[in-house]
């Protein structure tokens, strides 16, 4: 038990997109022989980032993406949101005297001390969010637009 946090990425691909060849490849790979639908499309969801008890990051999502509502709901996260999170994490890592990413207590949310684990969570978040922003930009150049969703459970 504890605070588990998930950022997933998703893409919707239609046979009318310029990525139709990708749909055909995936249908063939999965050996899908469904003749009931004459419109081929796919929704692909992949895990992007997983955190465990990084309650300061969860607090950021609740305040900045979920409008203060913390009910384990899935929430849409824009690429601008991810860039703002990265900017906030970078500011916190650059100035360790003023805590701007405050820990959040909660049912099995983990430690709320500003300790080595706190800073390690921020370093790992920075690395992972940078990777996802780079992924998004690379895919966008190929004409593929991914969306992101955040949810937590405990």
Image: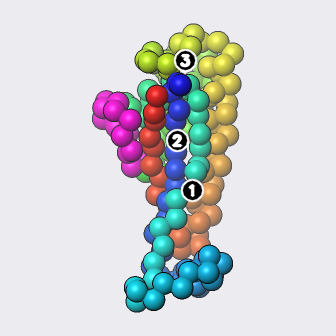
Q: Residue at 39%, 44% (x, y): give it.
A: 74
Residue 154's x, y, as percent? 46, 28
Mark 3 closeness class: few <14, some 14–19, many ≥20 residues within 10 Å: some
Q: Is residue 82 visible?
A: yes
User: In the displayed structure, does residue 13 sit left or right of residue 131?
Assistant: left
Could you say which is closer to the camera, residue 88 or residue 31? Answer: 31
Name the residue that disc number 1 marks: 46
> Residue 6's mark?
2
* Secondary element at tag 2: strand
Choose between 98 and 114: the one closer to the eye.
Answer: 114
Residue 25, x across and y down, in percent: 63, 81
Please rate how many residues cluster around mark 1, counting C-alpha atoms within 10 Å: few if below 14, some from 14 to 19, many from 20.
few
**Relative height, residue 72 to residue 56 (above, below):** below
- Left or right of 41 in this view: 124: right
Residue at numbered disc 3: 110
Q: Which residues are magenta?
A: 65-77
Q: Is residue 91 visible?
A: no
Secondary structure type for disc 1 = strand
């Amino acid at each position: 038990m504890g605070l588990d946090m998930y950022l997933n990425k998703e893409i919707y691909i239609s046979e009318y997109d310029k990525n139709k060849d990708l749909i055909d490849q995936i249908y063939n790979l999965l050996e899908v022989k469904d003749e009931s639908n004459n419109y081929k499309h796919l929704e692909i969801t992949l895990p992007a980032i997983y955190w465990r008890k990084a309650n300061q990051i969860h607090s950021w999502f609740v305040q900045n993406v979920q409008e203060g509502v913390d009910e384990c709901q899935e929430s849409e996260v824009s690429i601008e949101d991810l860039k703002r999170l990265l900017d906030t994490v970078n500011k916190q890592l650059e100035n360790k005297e003023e805590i701007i990413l405050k820990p959040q207590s909660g049912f099995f949310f983990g430690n709320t001390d500003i300790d080595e684990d706190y800073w390690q969570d921020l370093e790992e978040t920075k690395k992972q969010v940078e990777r996802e922003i780079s992924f998004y930009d690379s895919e966008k150049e190929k004409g593929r637009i991914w969306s992101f969703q955040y949810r937590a459970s405990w």
